[in-house]
Amino acid sequence: MAEFEPQIIAFTCNWCTYAAADLAGTSRIHYPANVRIVRVMCSGMVNPMYVFKAFEGGADGVIVAGCNYTDCHYIDGPVKCDTMFARLKKMVLILGLEEERLRREMISTSEGVIFARVVEEMVEQLKKLGPSPFKIKMETLA
Amino acid sequence: MNLEDIIQETKTYYCLECGKCSSLCPISRYDPQYSPRVMVENALLGLEDEIVYNKKLFSCLTCYTCQLKCPSDVDYPLFIQKARVLATAAGQHGDYAHSGTLQSIAMLMARSPLKQNRLEWLKKDGYRTSEKSDVMLFIGCSPYFEPVFEDIPMRTLNIAEASLKVLNSLGIEPLVHPDERCCGHDALWVGDVETFKKLAEHNAAIIKESGVKKVIFFCPECYRTFKLDYPNYVKLDCEVMHISELLAQRLETEGLRFNEVKKKVTYQDPCRLGRHLGIYDAPRKVLQAIPGIELVEMEHNREESICCGTSCFTNCDSYSKQIRVERLLEAKATGAETLITSCPKCQTHFRCAMVNKGEEKGPDIEIELMDLVNLVATSLGG
């Protein structure tokens, strides 16, 4: 059987983390291809629903990433994101998902290396954890 | 199932076009575009698209006000429930409040291999529960509501804790099951029967496995679903009971010793407990048994009580808000200091209205909100 390849959905903000991912690409940094990037205008606009939809669709892990507190294009996006994320985390933990499946990062435009490292770390963790419980069900249904 | 079957099943063809439903409907009062009568007429004319692709289909509160007054006994709430299944099959859905987070949580809960950590709140305090008990306390979605409604602030687990405390002081050590799931109420009423069936099967299975004879609810929606909807889908061999019924029963058989609580209160009948199941007296009996409590009724009470404005966390709009503000003003007009309800969702919706109050009516709708069980727990405690 082939090795389990986790699927990660990353919600990245247009101004910082998406640019960082772009930079990682243009600088030819190698990182696993398990991540699917969804560009959003601001990390503060990600609401719990987005993350639940990702898990519903069979994602093994989700990253919500955006600017640092001082860099936000919309002044207080990261603060909003933090509030949302704290609540989201509680819900996800009650649902019984492992903490490692959800990650909040702040990656600035110039930090392509950090983006690559975060993805690498997460893929490694998810490989240890195995597929998401929601995903298992989906596959047996099919 | 098609529209014709729904008409047959809900006896819609008896409609006299008298319009009592539309004149009583709390939504129609504020939203001129929504009318139960027009909905029924469209069904009888066979205009399926007018129903299925109508966004207002999801506005109905299924509060049973129309059904109780219909001279022809048309089961309009059931009609809405079934029509929503049709609409869902056609790819339609309502506007979910909280962006659909709560619907998503229920959908994820319906997928089976899941180890929830839903009993964290039990670890904190010295509540007595027992795994071998005959009685089960159904907690439902309360642990999930807690983070969702953190900012209102609405603490649903307070109600769960109070219920447990009340049961303990009645000498019952209930089973609180670590693997129960959402009862499926919202899924059923927004037309997602698949999710509902899975949740119902799961809950019926864990109840059968644990061998309990009685399940106690503090949420009228869970109670209604177990009592009226589960028998249509799964086999359930246990008694179901709302905590207010249990308290009223105990009051009659052996009496309860309450401490004095000085308060003037008014009571909001949740539609699931009141109109759906006809339980109006049990909570009132409990309230009146507490010394010091003065119960005053609102202008609309019992069968005529007004719904809290949203059902199933769907189509919560400015009309819902108006209903809530009106209801809160009614509560204020009684001169009561506390509005008691026995549904966590009613409380959530009223709290929300008070936080996001309208500019002009702002300060007038502030009133203390409390669940019946919380009041009983304070009065029984000590």
Image (spheres, rainbow, N blue to C red):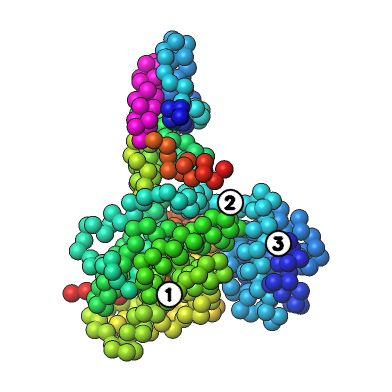
Q: Is residue A112 magenta?
A: yes
Residue lying at 54% horizontally and 60% vertically, measured from the top left: B197
**Disc 1 element:** loop
- Report in which chain the residue with disc 2 lies: B
Residue lying at 26% horizontally and 72% vertically, measured from the top left: B173
**Residue linked to disc 3:** B1
Q: Amino acid at mark 3?
A: Met
Q: Is residue A11 above or below residue B113?
A: above
Quadrant in which the C terminus of chain A is drawn: top right
Q: Amino acid at mark 2?
A: Asp
- Report in which chain the residue with disc 1 lies: B
- Report in which chain the residue with disc 3 lies: B
**Residue linked to disc 1:** B238
Q: Is residue B31 above or below residue A52?
A: below
Q: Position of residue B28 (x, y in %)?
A: 64, 66
Disc 1 and disc 3 on one polypeptide chain: yes
The magenta-colored residue range is: A106-129
Q: Main secondary structure of the magenta part?
A: helix
